[in-house]
Amino acid sequence: MENHMIRASNLTVRLSGKTIVQGVSLEARAGQITAIVGPNGSGKTTTLKAVAGEIASEGAITLNGRDIRALEPWQLAVRRAVLPQAAVVAFPFTVREIVRLGLSVGPNRHAERVETITSAALAAVDLAGFAGRFYQELSGGEQQRVQLARVLSQIWEPVLDGEPCFLLLDEPVSALDIRHQLAVMRLAKRYCEGGGGVIAVLHDLNLTALFADHMVMMRGGRVVEAGPPVSVMTDDAMEAVFGCRMCVNGVPSHGIPFVLPQTARV
Ligand SMILES: Nc1ncnc2c1ncn2[C@@H]1O[C@H](COP(=O)(O)OP(=O)(O)O)[C@@H](O)[C@H]1O
Ligand SMILES: [Mg+2]
């Protein structure tokens, strides 16, 4: 469907009197992983929060064609779920309790579904058997996967009433080892194959090349380039965005871009 996407047009966000995000437009379609990349402080988190409807912004934001500002909080909560860059848990919650927070609204809040989805979401992030553990006693990477399980359980079905749901993930793999990075990216891909959509802020450019269908490159609160990695990952675009010389090559058998910092050359 033409309007099965999150679309932001000319988004501007001002925080503490400063313009943090300026004139950002992006489209994140159902069925696709959209990656947001860019240096620290380029406005990725702020853009994601604005698109999620969590902070005030100027410009238009639609979810499946509807103005997100016209939706009730519960209507947003059943349609998009947000993994924050850093989640602070101040109370001694168990893993099960954290994941259940994601199930407090929406179509899966009935006891039997809560049980089934909690287990399935924990298994999906390779944390089967962790339900009774205390969150604060887990490693950083395990905590990140618990938060992902919570977010995933909030919109467990990628399509609800014939319309796609969207996972908005701010650096979902930043604390993960390589095997779990791949597992989480595959999970995102499966969500898209099931009809949902994913927006993910990513720092690993090769993981982006491997998994993203569409990428949005930001610098200084603006979008510099957007398109499929194979089109927009050029040496010059990478240098313009990240401020260091990089060499982009295709991995021979697949034609997937592979990014190597030039200074790593021996
Ligand atoms: N609440 C805030 N008040 C003032 N400045 C902020 C606030 N939040 C973020 N910023 C600034 O906005 C810029 C972009 O932040 P952010 O969106 O978190 O960047 P990124 O996620 O790309 O690293 C940074 O320079 C940051 O210091
Ligand atoms: Mg950020």
Image (cartoon, grey):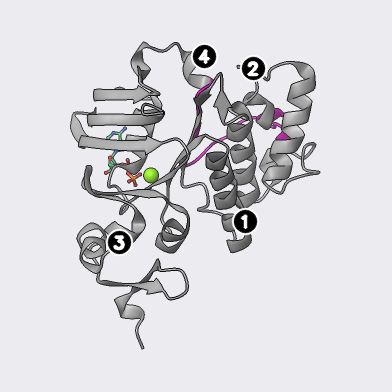
Pointer 2 local density, CA inside 10 Å: few below 14, some 14–19, many at least 20: some
Q: Quadrant of ligand 1?
A: top left
Q: Is residue 76 visible?
A: yes
Sequence-earlier tag: 2 or 3: 2
Residue range in magenta is 78-98
Sequence-earlier tag: 4 or 3: 4
Between the residue at mark 3 and the residue at mark 1, the CA separation in whole angstroms equals 25 Å
Q: Which residue is mark 1?
A: 180
Q: Residue at x 36, y 88 (%)?
A: 266
Q: Residue at x 65, y 51 (%)?
A: 139
Pointer 3 local density, CA inside 10 Å: few below 14, some 14–19, many at least 20: many
Describe the element under mark 1 as helix, strand or loop.
helix
Q: Which residue is mark 3?
A: 233
Above or below for 180 versus 26: below
Query: Is residue 78 left or right of 264 when viewed as pictured?
Result: right
Can you give x and y, in whole percent of width and height, for residue 60 in the image? 26, 23
Q: Is residue 89 visible?
A: no
Describe the element under mark 3 as helix, strand or loop.
loop
Query: Is residue 8 left or right of 109 when viewed as pictured?
Result: left
What number is the disc on residue 107? Answer: 2
